Image: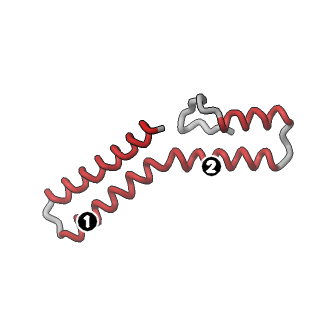
């Protein structure tokens, strides 16, 4: 978890530095330069948050499926186990449900 957090901070810092360097080199006004840096920070944060947002969408979908009552106990158990398994690796394009 700590490594993932460090990687996220590094990615955001790199995006910021890239925007700062680009802004400093292109002769734009200071307000535009600041806006470019803010935009880079926002984009980097959004990129880092997307996997967590997808995970939340997956959990919501799983809970909705369980709540609607159409699954049997074994199916509910399998969905719950998949949702909480730390060792379950999945692609970003491969939702749990």
The residue under label 1 is 34
SS of the residue at dot 1? helix
Q: Looking at the image, which is closer to me, 80 or 43? A: 80
Q: Around disc 1, counting alpha carbons within 10 Å, would you say few (fewer than 14), some (14 to 19), or many (20 or more)?
A: some
Residue 31: % across, % down:
23, 71
Left or right: residue 12 compared with residue 2: left
Splitting the image into 4 quarters, where does residue 26 fall? bottom left
Q: Looking at the image, which is closer to me, 64 or 86? A: 86
Residue at left offset 73%, top offset 38%: 80
Left or right: residue 58 compared with residue 8: right
Q: Looking at the image, which is closer to me, 95 or 78? A: 78
Instruction: State the mark number for residue 49.
Output: none
Residue at left offset 29%, top offset 66%: 35
Residue 56: % across, % down:
61, 49
Left or right: residue 26 compared with residue 31: left
* Coloring applied to the structure: secondary structure
Q: Which badge, 2 or 1, is on the more N-terminal residue?
A: 1
The residue under label 2 is 57
Contact check, label 2 and label 1, Cβ < 8 Å = no
Residue at left offset 41%, top offset 53%: 45
Splitting the image into 4 quarters, where does residue 25 fall? bottom left
Q: Around disc 2, counting alpha carbons within 10 Å, would you say few (fewer than 14), some (14 to 19), or many (20 or more)?
A: some
Left or right: residue 23 compared with residue 77: left
């Amino acid at each position: 978890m700590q490594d993932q957090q460090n990687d996220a901070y590094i990615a955001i810092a790199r995006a910021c530095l890239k925007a700062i360097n680009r802004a400093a080199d292109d002769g734009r006004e200071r307000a535009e330069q600041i806006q470019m840096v803010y935009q880079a920070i926002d984009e980097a944060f959004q990129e880092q948050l997307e996997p967590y947002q997808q995970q939340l969408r997956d959990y919501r979908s799983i809970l909705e499926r369980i709540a609607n009552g159409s699954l049997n106990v074994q199916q509910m158990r399998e969905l719950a186990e998949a949702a909480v398994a730390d060792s379950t690796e999945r692609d970003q394009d491969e939702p749990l449900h």
